[in-house]
Image (cartoon, rainbow, N blue to C red):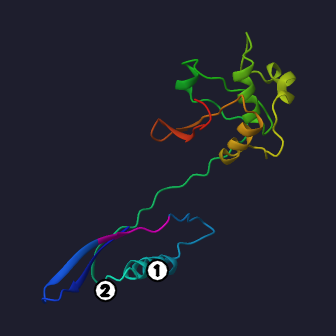
Amino acid sequence: MTDASFVRETADGRLMRVPSHFATPPVVVDDVQDYNIYALQSNLEHKLEQWNKRGSNFNIERVSRFLLSMHPYRTLHGSTFVHTPEFLANKCCLVNVQNNDEKCFVWSVLSALYPPTHNPHRLANYIDYEHSLDVEGLNFPVETKQIPLFEKFNPSISVNVLAFEESSKEFTVEYRSPERE
């Protein structure tokens, strides 16, 4: 984000100052793609040009603040079985189906739809129901961005995804179904 001050001289010789704010879109930077400072400069210059095209005849006087905000980005994707943190397992508040394939998403949905009376963590409880879900077009492991497609193919099911951050011991909402709550 950039805060700038624009100035122009009025007909009576006084200076008129107008504050303005410009923001650039977020950019993902990783080991493969470096941050392109020239693209940032070009984007800001374009925004300044658009602002001036409105016929203001203002000139940029100064940039009072230039903020570059960087945040860690963690791609969310499914994988094979991951052990439940002990403090959650002790609460008996969730089912973590033990599996050796990449269909964790399918097994977790089935565990909610068909709760068994004993050993809910065992995969054998859900194998018979595997084909009751329409997963056509989904890639396994299922990524969060594929969940709206799953909900479209399975309209009676809504999915919410929470992620547990081990470092902060907090949950974050990775996906919230717009369909139903």
User: Which residue carries the number 2 mark?
Assistant: 57
| Residue 22 within the segment the image draws in magenta | yes
User: In this picture, is 119 found above or below 158?
Assistant: above
Identify which amino acid the numbered label 2 is placed on: Asn
Which quadrant holds the C terminus?
top right
Image x and y of residue 45, in percent: 43, 81
User: Foreground mark, 1 or 2?
Assistant: 2
User: Closer to the camera, 60 or 2?
Assistant: 60
Query: What is the number of the mark on residue 88?
Result: none
Q: State the residue at coordinates (60%, 70%).
A: 33
Judging from the image, what secondary structure is the residue with disc 2 in? loop
| Left or right: 179, with 6 as reference point | right
Q: Position of residue 88 (x, y in %)?
A: 55, 25
The answer to whether residue 98 is visible is no
Q: Position of residue 124 (x, y in %)?
A: 83, 21
Nearest to N terminus: mark 1 or mark 2 = 1
Estimate the x, y position of residue 129 in percent, counting from the top left. Answer: 84, 23
Name the residue located 17 percent from the left edge and 89 percent from the top edge: 11
Residue in front for this viewpoint, 82 or 73: 73
Q: Tell me which corner region of the image, top left, top right, bottom left or bottom right, holds residue 44.
A: bottom left
Write down the residue under mark 1. 46
Q: What's the amino acid at mark 1?
A: His
Horizontally, residue 84 falls left or right of residue 125, namely left
Q: Residues within 10 Å of mark 2 (few under 14, many from 20)?
A: few
Crowding near pointer 1: few (<14 within 10 Å), some, many (20+)? few
In the image, farthest residue toward the top = 117
Q: Quadrant of residue 85?
A: top right
Q: CA distance from mark 1 to mark 2?
A: 16 Å
Side of 2 relative to 15 (left or right): right
Can residue 52 be seen at all in this image of the molecule?
yes
- What stretch of residues is rendered in magenta? 20-25
